[in-house]
Image (cartoon, helix red, strand yellow):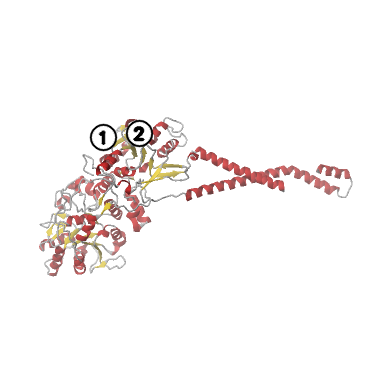
Amino acid sequence: MRAGARGAARAGGASPFADVQEDKDRMCHLTMKLLPRTQELWLCLGMVMGVAIGFTFIYTFRTEQSTSAPVRRPHYYHSHPVEDNATAAELYNKVRILCWVMTGPSNLETKARHVQATWTRHCNVVLFMSSVRDDGFPTVGLDVKEGRDQLYWKTIRAFQYVHRHHLEQADWFLKADDDTFVVLDNLRWLLANHTPEEPVYFGKRFKPFVKQGYMSGGAGYVLSKEALRRFVEGFRTQVCTHTSPVEDLALGQCMEKVGVQAGDTRDTKGRETFHPFPPERHLMENLRLDHYYPTYSFYPILLGAQSCSDLSISFHYVRPEEMYMLEYLSRHLRPHGYRPRYQPALTAGNRTEPREG
Amino acid sequence: MISESSSFVKGMVLGGLFCVFVTLLGHNKMGHGTKAHHHEHHHIQAPNKEDVSNLSEGERMELSHSIRVYCIILVKPKDLGNWAAVKETWSKHCDKAEFYSSESVKVFDSVVLNTNDMWVMVRNAYKLAYERYKDEYNWFFLAHPTTFAVIENLKYFLLKKDPSQPFYIGHTVKSGELEYVDGDGGIVLSIESLKRLSKIFEDPDKCPEQGGLIWKLSEDKQLAVCLKYTGVLAENAEDSEGKDVFNTKSVGSLIKEAMANHPQQVVEGCCSDMAITFNGLAPNHMHVMMYGVYRLRAYGHNFKDALVFLPPAGSDND
């Protein structure tokens, strides 16, 4: 079509618009050359856009699919109880235990907090004893200073405090450190065989220095109500005094003086329940070869699996992570359906009528 | 102008079609189109507590005996400490446990595989296990010597699952399109899955013996690929609260994470009451776990479980 116009223009000869027309013609010619390229260009651009949009669409669609698909569909079961807590609940009411934990301001967040989050939840009453009162934690502020040499003072003041303010709230009084782990239900099983009127105290029994032996402080020890009365009375009458800063030994000497019996806490198969070390040391080491342990251990040392009762009550030098782990292992994780080898009965001595107060 | 925009539109259409074509091609290659499932991640749950509450004691024991677990533990001489610990602890609770070793070791009996390559070890162990025990066991559990397993909880988990169906269970991980069971947490196959696996072992294209030459997959991924060709997909095992029961980490590690992430609910949030495996344990830790799982407990809490398991003979640490 244009060719015709060009042709006409050329045929026009010496018209005043001839140059312009020629330029125009040249431009058209050029444009014609470019035109297919332009069309190709637009085609290419279109394809790129198409691919880009397409992939974006598909990607979004797939992501939506995966996020809309339910990741977790919890099944809500009717609570059909598989667990029967009756015995534990009964013991909780019959064998009331007040736990006091020896701690200090610098240990509150690093150690005491984890004790508070785990085993002390199962005490009937729990008190954290410190040199400083802290209503937030909460801790009791005793009239003592911090330090290893103050441990017996702290113990004396703590028991006096408990005697003054909490005597009627419990039958048994447990002392533990902030790195002691205790299984309260197993302690109740042990104590169910005794009465709080007996002058007796229990723990990991050590043999030197005291004729009847004394209980390791770190492994935790528990006094009957009568034992607590005699301890406090002993200090009131000065029969007992602050003889040394070694808390467990000094207390053991006082106990002997006031006629409180050191009890045997081994289970019915002779295995220890209170432990001065974490489980790994007792289970894996031959503690008969240890420097001090044979000198201290009141009873013959059993090795391997026999070193720890199924119904162990305490372990010492337990780090925070291990507190949670022992809580999980003793109260949560279990082999479903498994009948344990050791299944002792709750032997004679337990009453059926509920306590008052 | 019109012709240009029409070219543009034509281009877009072509581009879009190209996209769709490529995507479909990709899907078909991975066999994704074979399953109508849009669920990206597969979960499988523990049985309902009410499921077996009306059975008598005898029926419970019978049911318990019907779930027969064969344990394969893959070991190498360097694992001797853990090998001993596994032998002395949890493996005693398998109906049968055997150690498949890369090479012969004087101290312990083992099934010698004569290879150091993990994938070849896995292949050959499964092959041998199927050949020898296909009529005697219905579930096959594969583990590493750093893993601690509670077989009773595994059996409890498998309670209502039919072993003649293809099951491939554990702690799953997604890698692109592939969902596979992480070997660190232990791998559970039903007899049906093992049967299919044995068949696909004979196909060197789909399930090569030596893995890829250029790009070698880890043995747990390779296993998933082979199983996928037979129509068996990995499923992540969870309890009724959605917690994983197969763990690729130790209790200690999980506790530490819980202490950092939810310090108010460490034990509650950490791990399942019916956990089946933990991994990354040193030999001493295995013994502590054995004591903590089978022996240490709080007095006065009694349970009426669906199954009944008695302690194994000749053992004192459980």
Between the C-alphas of marks 2 and 1, the distance is: 20 Å
Determine whether the residue tagged by mark 2 lies in a helix, strand or loop. helix
Q: Which residue is rendered at x = 48% and y = 48% of the image?
A: A66
Q: Which residue is rendered at x = 50% and y = 50% of the image?
A: A64
Give the percent coordinates (x, y) of residue A32: 75, 43
The quadrant holding residue A189 is: bottom left
- The residue wearing badge 1 is B107
Q: Which residue is rendered at x = 40% and y = 39% of the image?
A: B220
Circles 2 and 1 on the same chain: yes
The quadrant holding residue A105 is: bottom left
Give the percent coordinates (x, y) of residue B208: 44, 32
Image-based side of B214 in relation to A117, left or right: right
- Residue B116 in view: no
- Mark identifier at residue B125: 2
Q: Which residue is rendered at x = 46% and y = 45% of the image?
A: B40
- Residue B311 in view: yes
Image-based side of A142 in relation to B169, left or right: left
Circle 1 Cα neighbour tier, 10 Å, few/some/many (<14 / 14–19 / ≥20): few
Give the percent coordinates (x, y) of residue B104: 30, 32
Circle 2 Cα neighbour tier, 10 Å, few/some/many (<14 / 14–19 / ≥20): many
Determine whether the residue tagged by mark 1 lies in a helix, strand or loop. loop
The quadrant holding residue B174 is: top left
> Tags 2 and 1 in contact by the CB under 8 Å rule?
no
Q: Quadrant of the C terminus of chain B?
A: top left
Residue type pointed to by label 2: Ala
Subunit ID for the residue under disc 1: B
Residue type pointed to by label 1: Val
Subunit ID for the residue under disc 2: B
